[in-house]
Amino acid sequence: MPSAGCGAMFDLTALQGAVAAHGQVARLVIAGHDGSSPREVGAAMLVWASGESGTIGGGALEFEAVARARSLLVAGGTRLDRIALGPALGQCCGGRISLLTEIYDTATVAALQGQEVIARPVASSLGEMPLAVRRLLSGARGKGLMPVPQLVQGWMVEPVAQPGRPLWIWGAGHVGRALVSVLAPLPGLQITWIDTAPARFPENMPAGVAPVWAGAPEGLADHAPAGAWHLIVTYSHALDLELCHRLLRRGFDWAGLIGSATKWARFRSRLAGLGHAPSEIGRIVCPIGTPALGKHPQAIAVGVAAQLLNNQHKSETEITGVNRETTTFAAGGPDEGLSGRGGE
């Protein structure tokens, strides 16, 4: 099952899947924090009678929160807890979080369909939607300005997670398998894994990974989404070169190629001979990852994961940076003193 966190957005797909599989499900989300917090505002997890998915930070905080959520599955309702991360939990973070727990079933999940931003009161007594929340929703609808997750005058506001960025991994050898094992659990990625035959893939495919095989896989490059990321780690230098050539013709958002400085120097020369401009060739990253970590497949995968997470963070910052609004919280409201997002 997909992670419930999904890059600090409301992962409606994961919630739908959990409700379909388990019936009533509790969703726990960090609604705000002062000082240190184990996760960012919007980080969420799902809890049902016999299991859970995602994390709000682990440790005693999560252990006790899961127990409260299971009690709420029986009693019903919604609760907002303010929790000090101190000695009572055996923790020394020193911060304080606001944790919202809500119960969802088939009917309540169905009511969320079609929404780009989910806004709801944390208590039934709060009355009509505040102007500050209406403005956030209007900005999302009219200008495409997605708000960051936040608690606004007693209303929890979260953008709905959209389909992940396409990531095409070319090659199912040792490095390809290591990359998939590290990258598949991360939120915000939609992985397509390509090789020449079904026998090249492991028997147990990670959740959310789509294997594709073709005798001439380079032909698939002509059908890749223009905004996709690519990792080229095949068994063949000739195939690697052909993929670089075709992806440069097709267009891409980011592409990385496994190899040494010598391999890349030769590829640059050959790609130039195929008619590609130096500025375009330079968009391909080679080598990938963090060479100082070594050449073990898992070490390469860890370095690449950090590289992609940095890319993803930069992209999300560009999109949401202009949408972070300073909101004045109503005195005495449910979120009083919990609007700080330090550590996000």
Image (spheres, rainbow, N blue to C red):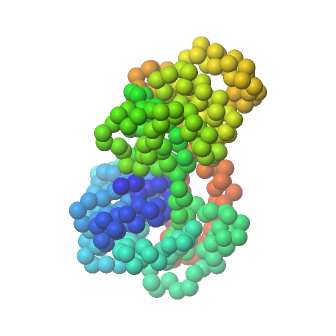
Residue 175 image point, x, y percent? 43, 28
Quadrant in which the N terminus appears: bottom left
The mark tally for this picture is: 0
Determine if residue 40 is in view: no
To which quarter of the image does residue 78 belong?
bottom left
Instruction: From this view, report whether residue 231 is shown above or below residue 2.
Output: above
In the picture as drawn, the residue positioned furthest to the left comes out as 50
User: What's the residue at 56%, 85% (across, down)?
Assistant: 128
**Residue 330's x, y, as percent?**
57, 76
For residue 52, side relative to residue 304 (left or right)? left
Q: Is residue 135 above or below residue 150?
A: below
Q: Residue furthest top?
A: 262
Residue at 58% across / 16% down in the picture? 263
Q: Which residue corresponds to the image point at 64% horizontal and 33% vertical from the top-left?
A: 246
Please, is residue 216 above or below residue 95 in the view?
above
| Residue 108 visible to an observer of this rendering | yes
Rendering coords of residue 211 (x, y %): 43, 43
Task: In this rendered view, identify the residue nearer to me: 57 or 300.
Answer: 300
Identify which residue, 306 or 224, lies in the foreground.
Answer: 224
- Write the residue at 50% across / 56% down: 8
- The residue lying toward the viewer, choosing from 253 and 161, is 253
Provide residue 62's location: percent of width, then percent of height: 32, 57
**In the rendered image, the vertical position of residue 82 relative to residue 92, given as above or below:** below
